[in-house]
Image: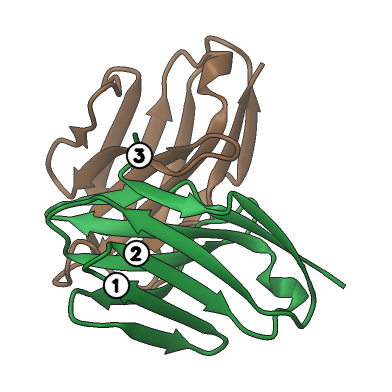
Amino acid sequence: KNQVEQSPQSLIILEGKNCTLQCNYTVSPFSNLRWYKQDTGRGPVSLTIMTFSENTKSNGRYTATLDADTKQSSLHITASQLSDSASYICVVRQWHDMRFGAGTRLTVKP
Amino acid sequence: GAVVSQHPSRVICKSGTSVKIECRSLDFQATTMFWYRQFPKQSLMLMATSNEGSKATYEQGVEKDKFLINHASLTLSTLTVTSAHPEDSSFYICSASPAGGPWETQYFGPGTRLLVL
């Protein structure tokens, strides 16, 4: 079983709408959690990084939350744009290992 | 800043041949580079970690004699897929950690699509 589970697996929304992606993890001990955006056929690009003591962090229209007690994180995208169509990957660091989620495939339609 | 390039972006080869993929950090020096493989609709899977001037560390299940990694300089790492087979067809992505920075700060390359016929 993957130590980093993301949901939903895929999501389709209309341009301008908001959406929230989920990441649940069982990785322990926990060092930090990152959200990456990966466009099709491209390498991932970091959006946010959150440590144990941080509850929320924003990067433009992207806002990540972290609940280290329940081991859950979310990525909220506001006022979606067509260019937001991509896979969003949650990565949890454990000591010197990084555990990758399978990603959520987001499609924004006009 | 912090740009990582990969070459080629896509390659098609015949079964049994070898393919070399280059990963370059363009504007920074990278003491550590990582190689990942990603199958369709799946997450990135770490194959190996390479440190400049030393042998690469391979993840469990990755054949070091099949996936040869050379990290000869602080800006270049190469992955050679030897005697490629159709099951090696995948998306190969490298990442690089800037020298002097935390290893977990990784800048990813754009990936190389390998198709073995």
Callout 2 amino acid = Gln
Of helix, strand and loop, which one carries label 1? Answer: strand
Q: Are marks 2 and 1 in contact (CB under 8 Å)?
A: yes
Q: Which residue is mark 3?
A: A2
Of helix, strand and loop, which one carries label 3? Answer: loop
Specify few, some or many for label 3: CA neighbours under 10 Å numbering under 14, 14-19, or 20 or more: few
Can residue B1 be seen in the rendering of this structure? no
Are labels 3 and 1 assigned to the same chain?
yes
Q: Residue at x 38, y 35 (%)?
A: B79
Chain designation of label 1: A
Q: Which residue is mark 1?
A: A67
Q: Would residue A70 be found to the left or right of residue B92 on screen?
A: left
Q: Which chain is brown?
A: B
Residue B117: x, y in percent?
Answer: 67, 16
Distance between the alpha carbons at the discs numbered 2 and 3: 14 Å
Q: Residue furthest top?
A: B16
